[in-house]
Image (cartoon, rainbow, N blue to C red):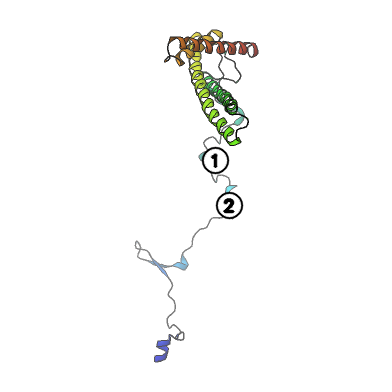
Amino acid sequence: MGVWDVFTGAKQPAQPSSSSTAEPMLHDPASGNTTSNSNITFSTPSTEDVGSFLTTPGAFDPAALHPLAGLNQDTLDYLSLDDSALSDLPGGRSVLPSRGWSDDLCYGTGVTYLAALSLGGAWGLAEGLNRLPSTAPPKLRINSALNAITRRGPFLGNSAGVVALLYNGVNSTLGYYRGQHDSFNSVAAGAISGAVFRSTRGIRPMVISGGIVASVAGSWALTRKLVFDE
């Protein structure tokens, strides 16, 4: 190879190797023997594919993969949770099936709040539209209506929600200790919850509020007795 080939990087022609490639050998330290790789054989599984492996009897245990694999579905008894049973107190039937005081508290408070919020929104809408003359610009009328809706709706909804929360709590407590739900529970719970709601305003507001809520509760108890009780 010349100097020019060194600078230009020309490849040298391949030269035949004088020595043959050595065969890899394995050495056993225990016995001191050396064994060629060609003499070692490995056993391969006879399974052809995954499907044949899964269908082979005894390939895997289903009970080890799923603890309930060996149960008989025809003789399996399902558990009956106590909290899923409906309330069996006399007079406990209502618009929605109830499992106890928790359902009455959630359903009663939520429905009362939404109903009062809608009623307060309608009240505010009418008040806001009637506050300005019909000749007022539409933007002013819309602004007045929105202000009245946001003032009357939440006020009435929050007040009714608090009263309903107190009412359902007292009513459920009376029903638990008396062992039944009747008109007396509803009227007493209405009077107590209304009085507690206005307890910070004095005696006279407490009496008025208690009488109003007791009247509404008595009307609801009478309606429920006529419609739902057999």
Name the residue that disc number 1 marks. Answer: 62
Name the image quarter holding the C terminus: top right
From the viewer's side, name the closer residue of 114 and 172: 114
Residue visible at 51% across and 40% down in the picture: 64
Q: Is residue 196 visible?
A: yes
Q: Is residue 1 visible?
A: no
Dividing the picture into quadrants, the one containing residue 200 is top left
Other residues around mark 1 within 10 Å, as few (<14) / some (14–19) / many (≥20) = few
From the viewer's side, name the closer residue of 121 and 136: 136
Name the image quarter holding the N terminus: bottom left
Residue 154 point in image, percent of width and height: 51, 26
Q: Amino acid at mark 2?
A: Val
Name the residue that disc number 2 marks. Answer: 50
Q: Is residue 28 left or right of residue 175?
A: left
Residue visible at 51% across and 12% down in the picture: 190
Residue visible at 43% across and 87% down in the picture: 8
Q: Is residue 9 above or below residue 91?
A: below
Residue visible at 48% across and 17% down in the picture: 166
Q: Amino acid at mark 1?
A: Pro
Other residues around mark 2 within 10 Å, as few (<14) / some (14–19) / many (≥20) = few
Q: Is residue 45 above or below residue 7?
A: above
Dividing the picture into quadrants, the one containing residue 5 is bottom left
Element marked by disc 1: helix
Q: Name the residue furthest front.
A: 135
Element marked by disc 2: helix
Q: In the rendered structure, are the residues bearing label 1 and label 2 in contact, judged by CB atoms less than 8 Å apart?
A: no
Q: CA distance from mark 1 to mark 2?
A: 17 Å
Residue 32 point in image, percent of width and height: 35, 65
Q: Is residue 4 left or right of residue 109?
A: left
Q: Is residue 175 above or below residue 119?
A: above
Ranked by sequence position, the earlier of labels 1 and 2 is: 2
